[in-house]
Amino acid sequence: MFESFRRSASEYLERPAYHADFRRHYESGIRFLNKLERGQSFKERGFPSWEAFAAGEWSRALTLVDEKRDIYAAQFRKAAELGILERRLRVVEFPVTPYVQWELFVLRLRVELGDHIRVMDARKISDIESECLVPEVVIVGDEVMYEVVYDDDGNAAGANRILDRTAIEETSDGFDVLYRRGESFMEFFDREIAPLDPPTIVH
């Protein structure tokens, strides 16, 4: 699974160029958008909830998540207007990292607003990941996909753009297989995330 993705040629785009290219393709008449998230620790500077989380202010971080409600709702309205089905699969390792614990509260808001998110326990794909991890990838219809790239400090830096149609199709097929195998977001959240104590942030 994902062999063609790993072999495909790509072009690196800095973050502003990636965002511009993504928007252009997103509004070009695509029918679906699939996101596969694999990393377990990132930084999201400028997001007030993440800033509070990083400062160890857990209760405040959770309160600030709701500030994204109108922004996310507008995103989903636009996707509906464009006729785009958006799906996301979040791979989670155990023990759950502080970042993922925080992020799943953000994703819970998205699910409440209608996002289609499922969760995959990383232990259930150990056979697939025997040689390398599944990719951190955004698949924009059958036109383009992006391997999201982060710097050594966990900040989003840009993306590798892949235009190979065969690689896009095969990666989409792999995503579909894992998405079907994934678990309902709210079932996973209620069982694995809601009972956890506030995370300890180590700087």
Image (spheres, grey):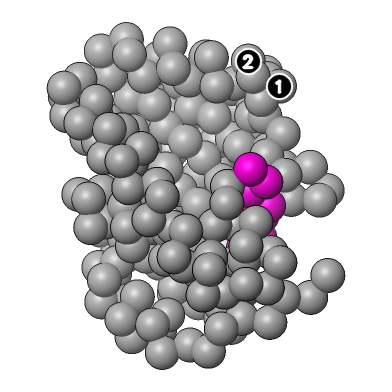
Residue 29 is situated, as x and y percent measured from the top left of the image, at 25, 13
Question: Which residue does the numbered mark 2 point to in the structure image?
Answer: 17
- Numbered label attached to residue 72: none
Q: In this view, does 145 lie above or below 65?
A: above
Name the magenta segment's main secondary structure.
loop
- Name the residue rendered at 74%, 50% in the picture: 154
Q: Residues within 10 Å of mark 2 (few under 14, many from 20)?
A: few
Quarter holding residue 120: bottom left
The image position of residue 14, as x and y in percent, is 71, 21
Residue at position x 25%, y 77% in the image: 187
Range of magenta residues: 38-46
Residue 45 drawn in magenta: yes
| Res 83 quadrant in image | top left
Q: In this view, does 157 lie above or below 62?
A: above
Q: Is residue 104 above or below residue 77?
A: below
Q: Mark 1 points at which residue?
A: 14
Q: Do the residues labelled 1 and 2 touch (CB within 8 Å)?
A: yes
Write the residue at 46% across / 67% down: 62
